[in-house]
Amino acid sequence: MRYEGWELNFFDNSKNFRIYQFLLIKKYLKSKILEIGPGNGIFAEQFVSKFFNDISLSEIDKNLNKKLTKKFKKNKNIKIYKKKINEFKNKFNTIIYSDVLEHIKDDENEIKLALKRLNKNGNLIIMVPAFQFLYSNYDKSIGHFRRYRKNFFINYGKKNKIKLVKIIYFDSMGFLFVCLNRLINSKKKSSVNIGTFIWNLCIPISRFLDKVLGFSIGKSILCIYKK
């Protein structure tokens, strides 16, 4: 995985989007949670930890892991690890990959390994960028191997006989912004900064439009498998 500090900061500051993500997955969260690739740990810190007290964060990036260890040093409810999913021996009731799977070359094997670390009736929650035709220099610059369509997760579930609880596109306004970015074909940090700020302001519109459109289009995909 390759991380860009500026990219993490921009998206962590997009609080409207983070709130929206949490609202979409909240009812599928069960105590004893593992988040793989949490970055700066904002999602766990600002949302998940307010409702659950058994949270594990695993970040293999050396610098980010150091930041997480320092940030949550006094928080007994959040444990920090530097492990890949196959290095865990214990099991969890919820495993989260929030904008992480696209950074992993062998994504199908990663899903397989994550499911093995779930307890029975546990949920694997995956959020990824949508639509490969939108793949741009920006995606490449931040270490994305790919973008996704719903069919990838539907077919994976059928092939491996895994129960698919939920599969939707979300953030329709974000889809528009990504399309514009694809046309500009720019990876300049300044343009991402401005675009991210405006996009975050538009999230309430996305929440309304997503419902109207039946979650049929969006810049992101939410997939939830149940073991």
Image (cartoon, grey):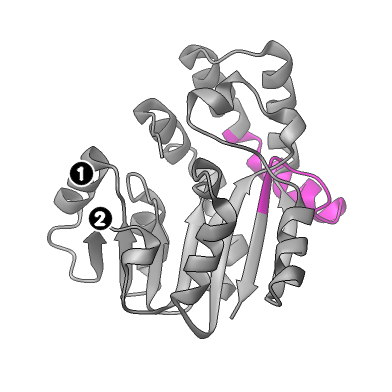
**Relative to 81, 201 lies left or right:** right
Pointer 1 residue: 67
Viewer-nearest of labels 1 and 2?
2
Q: Position of residue 204 (x, y in %)?
A: 67, 44
Q: Are marks 1 and 2 in contact (CB under 8 Å)?
A: no
Pointer 1: residues within 10 angstroms few (<14), some, or many (20+)?
A: some
Residue type at numbered disc 1: Lys
Nearest the viewer among 82 and 218 is 82
Q: Which of the marked residues, 1 or 2, is nearer the chain's N terminus? A: 1
Q: Which mark is residue 82?
A: 2
Q: Position of residue 61 (x, y in %)?
A: 29, 42
Above or below for 7 versus 95: above
Q: Position of residue 52 (x, y in %)?
A: 37, 74
Segment tinted magenta in the rendering:
200-221
- Which image quadrant is residue 108 in? bottom right
In the image, what residue occupies the spot 49% across and 45% down? 104
* The C terminus sits in image quarter: bottom right
User: Does residue 218 show up magenta in the picture?
Assistant: yes
In the image, what residue occupies the spot 80% across and 46% down? 209
